Image (tube, rainbow, N blue to C red):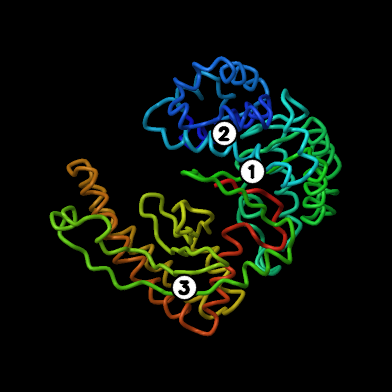
């Protein structure tokens, strides 16, 4: 079954294809959330309805393990009032991409003309996204490149977090040919991230592919190129400063008092490292997710409040820490492992009571267990490390890796 993320990314692919058909002039004129505050009003415009019908055959958007989304599935989801923010974001990003796409690379300028040129739009498909991930896996098996050449990438999103791709038939053919050349057990060893990034860079430079990472936009949209010029990325990463570190042992409240406390006044369970990078402020948040069982390091900019990257396990966090201090990394991992076992034991009686508890109370109780076991054990270790001589270096490495800015990461564009 498809989730909201799959729908949102598929809707974005559809509206970017609509903008491609309309061309720059008509897109700027017609894609207006004030003029068309919902999908129903937008589809009453015959030009936009025609653009949608023409655009759908140009998109290849699939949900995980499933078939291609139908146009009816996408429009039904996008027209649901609960998805109003995504509807607005979809229009705003499609419009902004058309306005700025030639500044990403001049070879994309032909998309500004009305009617389709040479691009199609992909999300979760076999020929572009699946094949690119296959090439990533081949390179990741051969190379140790992440975090200063000390570890492999944890997943494809740390190389490139692209949610959708604009791509041509020439791009599909090039990707397929590269898999054929380097997909055998013997030839795999000769493939590298240098080769993968060179291939993707050439396709971007020729206007044949564009990896696009999406964040929900509100009001205004920013289009940002990432990893196009390494010296600029290094300058940006090295501008990072820690402005504050926030953590204290969690004090569990009785449920009645907790539920009566406004969310903004509740004690946080996580450890927060407040940072400034260039002109942007945000938070590196270290937390245990008791619902999914993962220990996460997330980067969340203050503007927009949408997560822009994460490290998805205690093991990976410790590996990043290990590049600076093996003793501290081992201590963090040891404390986490012991606390995780304690968390599981304390959850056993709670799980037995789950059926008799309402959802909010169960989540409160589970959060308390997480905070008083895992965060109570790892919080002090992280706090001490960030306050020590390697704290700033660690923050930079976490930011670099979680936001896909490692030296071997690929080029992509963020729309937010």
Location of mark 2 (residue): 12
393, above or below 259, in the image: below
User: Left or right of 285: which side holds 269?
Assistant: left
Q: Distance between the Cα atoms at labels 3 and 1?
A: 35 Å
177, above or below 373, in the image: above
Q: Position of residue 267 (x, y in %)?
A: 27, 64
Which comes sooner in the sequence, label 3 or label 1? 1
Tell whether label 1 touches label 3 (CB within 8 Å): no
| Callout 3: SS | helix
Q: Position of residue 93 (x, y in %)?
A: 57, 39
Location of mark 3 (residue): 332
Residue at the image point whose x is 55% and y is 20% from the top: 70
User: Left or right of 90: which side holds 127?
Assistant: right
Which comes sooner in the sequence, label 1 or label 2? 2
Q: Nearer the viewer, mark 3 or mark 1?
A: 1
Residue at the image point whose x is 47% and y is 63% from the top: 282
- Which numbered disc covers residue 277? none
User: Left or right of 208: which side holds 81?
Assistant: left
Most foreground residue, 223 or 260 = 223
Tell whether label 2 touches label 3 (CB within 8 Å): no
Which class describes the residues within 10 Å of circle 2: few (<14), some (14-19), or many (20+)?
A: many
The residue at the far left in this view is: 256
User: Left or right of 164: which side holds 291?
Assistant: left
| Callout 2: SS | helix
Location of mark 1 (residue): 212
Q: Which of marks 3 and 2 is in front?
A: 2
Tell whether label 2 touches label 1 (CB within 8 Å): yes
Most foreground residue, 42 or 138 = 42
Residue at the image point whose x is 74% and y is 45% from the top: 135
Q: Where is residue 268 in the image (x, y as percent from the top left)?
A: 31, 63
Which class describes the residues within 10 Å of circle 3: few (<14), some (14-19), or many (20+)?
A: many
């Amino acid at each position: 079954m498809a989730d909201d993320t799959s729908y949102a990314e598929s809707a974005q692919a559809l509206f970017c294809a609509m903008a491609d058909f309309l061309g720059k002039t008509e897109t700027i004129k017609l894609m207006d959330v004030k003029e068309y505050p919902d999908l129903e009003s937008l589809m009453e415009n015959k030009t936009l309805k025609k653009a949608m019908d023409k655009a759908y055959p140009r998109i290849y958007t699939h949900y995980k393990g499933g078939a291609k989304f139908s146009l009816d599935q996408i429009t039904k989801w996008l027209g649901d009032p609960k998805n109003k923010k995504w509807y607005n974001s979809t229009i705003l990003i499609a419009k902004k991409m058309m306005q700025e796409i030639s500044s990403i690379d001049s070879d994309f300028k032909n998309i500004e003309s009305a009617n389709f040129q040479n691009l199609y739009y992909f999300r979760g498909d076999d020929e572009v996204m699946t094949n690119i991930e296959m090439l990533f896996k081949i390179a990741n098996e051969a190379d140790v490149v992440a975090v200063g050449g000390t570890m492999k990438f944890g997943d494809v999103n740390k190389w490139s977090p692209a949610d959708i791709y604009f791509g041509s038939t020439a791009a599909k053919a090039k990707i397929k040919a590269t898999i054929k050349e380097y997909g055998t057990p013997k030839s795999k060893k000769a493939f590298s991230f240098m080769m993968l990034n060179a291939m993707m860079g050439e396709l971007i430079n020729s206007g044949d592919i564009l990896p696009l990472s999406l964040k929900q936009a509100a009001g205004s949209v920013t289009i940002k190129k990432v990893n196009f010029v390494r010296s600029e990325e290094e300058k940006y990463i090295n501008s990072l400063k820690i402005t504050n570190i926030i953590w204290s042992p969690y004090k569990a409240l009785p449920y009645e008092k907790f539920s009566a406390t406004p969310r903004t006044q509740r004690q946080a369970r996580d450890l927060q490292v407040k940072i400034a990078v260039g002109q942007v402020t945000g938070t590196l948040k270290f937390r245990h997710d008791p619902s999914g069982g993962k220990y996460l390091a997330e980067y969340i900019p203050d503007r927009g409040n949408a997560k822009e990257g994460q490290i998805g396990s205690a093991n990976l966090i410790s590996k990043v820490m290990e590049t600076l201090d093996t003793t501290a990394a081992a201590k963090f991992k040891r404390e986490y492992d012991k606390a995780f076992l304690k968390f599981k034991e304390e959850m056993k009686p709670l799980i037995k009571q789950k059926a008799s508890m309402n959802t909010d109370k169960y989540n409160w109780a589970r959060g308390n267990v997480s905070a008083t076991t895992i965060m109570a054990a790892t919080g002090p270790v992280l706090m001490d490390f960030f306050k020590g001589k390697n704290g700033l270096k660690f923050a930079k490495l976490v930011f670099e890796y979680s936001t896909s800015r490692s030296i071997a990461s690929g080029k992509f564009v963020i729309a937010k």
